[in-house]
Image (cartoon, rainbow, N blue to C red):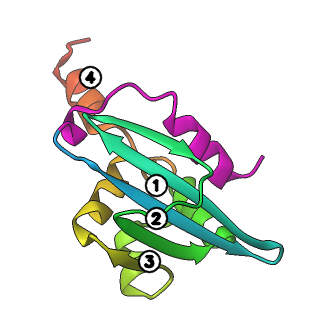
Amino acid sequence: MDQSTQFFEGLNHRPPEPLLSKIRGTVRFELESDTGVDVWLLVFSAGSVSAAQAARPADCTIRTDRTFFNLIASGEADTFAALLRNRLTVEGDLQLFPYLNHLVPGPPGAHEPRQWVLQRGQRP
């Protein structure tokens, strides 16, 4: 299983995210490869995100090649930089695009800031 599939399937097992609690909408991902186009649909609802392979219309559509999305799914590429460099395209409700950053991991070796602050506050 590649990074993209792990990423999308992993979204179904995440606890609700407080930062996404007021977000409602659907995002369709079209990942191009040599064998065709894989389509994933994300549904944002009350802090939860679910993912399924479904070719339905959505509020926002994101297109890129599967190999590049594997870099995003592993934290090695940033979604905003990818958009600015034309590595991915976004159509429809652009307000949903920034919330993707709450779902993808940070760069390799990065730390979770809340945990880091908690650990710094502890005395040896």
Which residue: 51% across, 82% down? 87
Position above or below: 38 against 16: below
Q: Amino acid at mark 1?
A: Pro
Horizontal side of 37 relative to 34 (left or right) equals left
Q: CA distance from mark 3 to mark 1?
A: 14 Å
Q: Which residue is mark 2?
A: 57
Q: Is residue 100 visible?
A: yes
Circle 4: residue type: Gln
- Residue 4 shown in magenta: yes
Query: To which residue does mark 3 refer?
Result: 82
Q: Quadrant of residue 115?
A: top left
Q: Earlier in the sequence, mark 2 or mark 4?
A: 2
As measured in the structure, the alpha-carbon distance from the residue carrying label 1 to the one carrying label 2 is: 31 Å
Q: Secondary structure at mark 3?
A: helix
Q: Which mark is residue 107?
A: 1
Which of the two marks, 2 or 3, is nearer to us in this view?
Answer: 2
Q: Is the C-beta separation of discs 3 and 1 under 8 Å?
A: no
State which region is magenta: 1-21
Contact between marks 3 and 4 (CB within 8 A): the answer is no
Marks 2 and 4 in Cβ contact (< 8 Å):
no
The mark that comes first in sequence, 1 or 4, is 1
- Is the residue marked by circle 3 packed among few (<14), some (14-19), or many (20+) residues within 10 Å? some
The correct choice, above or below, for 89 with respect to 61 in the image is below
Residue for point 27% across, 34% down: 47
Residue 7 in percent (x, y) is at 58, 46
First along the sequence among labels 3 and 1: 3
Q: Residue furthest right?
A: 35
Labelled disc at residue 119: 4
Q: Quadrant of the C terminus?
A: top left
Viewer-nearest of labels 3 and 4?
3
Q: Is residue 107 left or right of residue 17?
A: right
